[in-house]
Image (cartoon, rainbow, N blue to C red):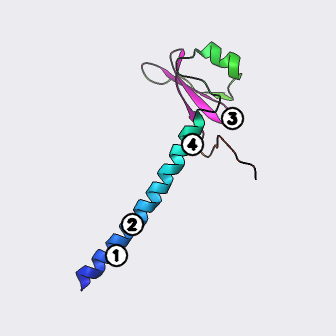
Amino acid sequence: MTRMVLALIFTSLFGLLTTATLSADVLLIEEVRQSGRMEVPENGMKTADVRGRFGEPAKVHAAVGDPPITEWEYDHWSVYFEYDLVLFTVLHKGEVIDKKSE
């Protein structure tokens, strides 16, 4: 009897955890799809081109490592450079690309 109760509890918990994980994955996928509609620096852009197109960053972090990786922070996203070229751009936590007005 105890084994049946434990099995039922574990099965229920597994179901709840799986459902929570699936909904989180759906939200992340939707944000990735929306990122294609946002204007951010593209991989391979040069630092001068990023400054010319997006303006001065709010904060510039010193280069770290070898090869040197530099981070520039803007209001809603950060861009990472290797030497003079964009590696990738990352949205800041909690930023939403496509805000719906209701």
Q: Earlier in the sequence, mark 4 or mark 2?
A: 2
Left or right, 34 with reference to 5: right
CB atoms of marks 4 and 2 within 8 Å: no
Labelled disc at residue 47: none
Q: Is residue 51 magenta-colored?
A: no
Indicate the amino acid at tag 1.
Ile
Secondary structure beneath dot 4 equals: helix
CB atoms of marks 4 and 1 within 8 Å: no
Q: Earlier in the sequence, mark 3 or mark 4?
A: 4
Give the distance between the C-alpha atoms of the residues marked 4 and 1, in whole angstroms: 34 Å
Q: Looking at the image, is mark 1 or mark 3 nearer the viewer? A: 1
Residue picked out by circle 2: 15
Callout 4 crowding tier (Cα within 10 Å): few <14, some 14–19, many ≥20: some
Secondary structure beneath dot 2 equals: helix
Query: Residue 70 appears in which quarter of the rendering?
Result: top right
Indicate the amino acid at tag 2.
Gly
Residue at the limit of the structure toward the right, as seen here = 102
Indicate the amino acid at tag 4.
Glu
Q: Earlier in the sequence, mark 2 or mark 3?
A: 2
Give the distance between the C-alpha atoms of the residues marked 1 and 3, in whole angstroms: 46 Å
Q: Estimate the x, y position of residue 42 in percent, counting from the top left.
A: 57, 23
Give the distance between the C-alpha atoms of the residues marked 3 and 4, in whole angstroms: 18 Å
Q: Looking at the image, is mark 4 or mark 1 nearer the viewer? A: 4
Q: Which residues are magenta?
A: 66-92
Labelled disc at residue 9: 1
| Relative depth, front residue between 95 and 69 | 95
Q: Earlier in the sequence, mark 2 or mark 1?
A: 1
Labelled disc at residue 75: 3
Query: Residue 3 appears in which quarter of the rendering?
Result: bottom left
Q: Estimate the x, y position of residue 94 in percent, counting from the top left.
A: 62, 46
Give the distance between the C-alpha atoms of the residues marked 2 and 1, in whole angstroms: 10 Å
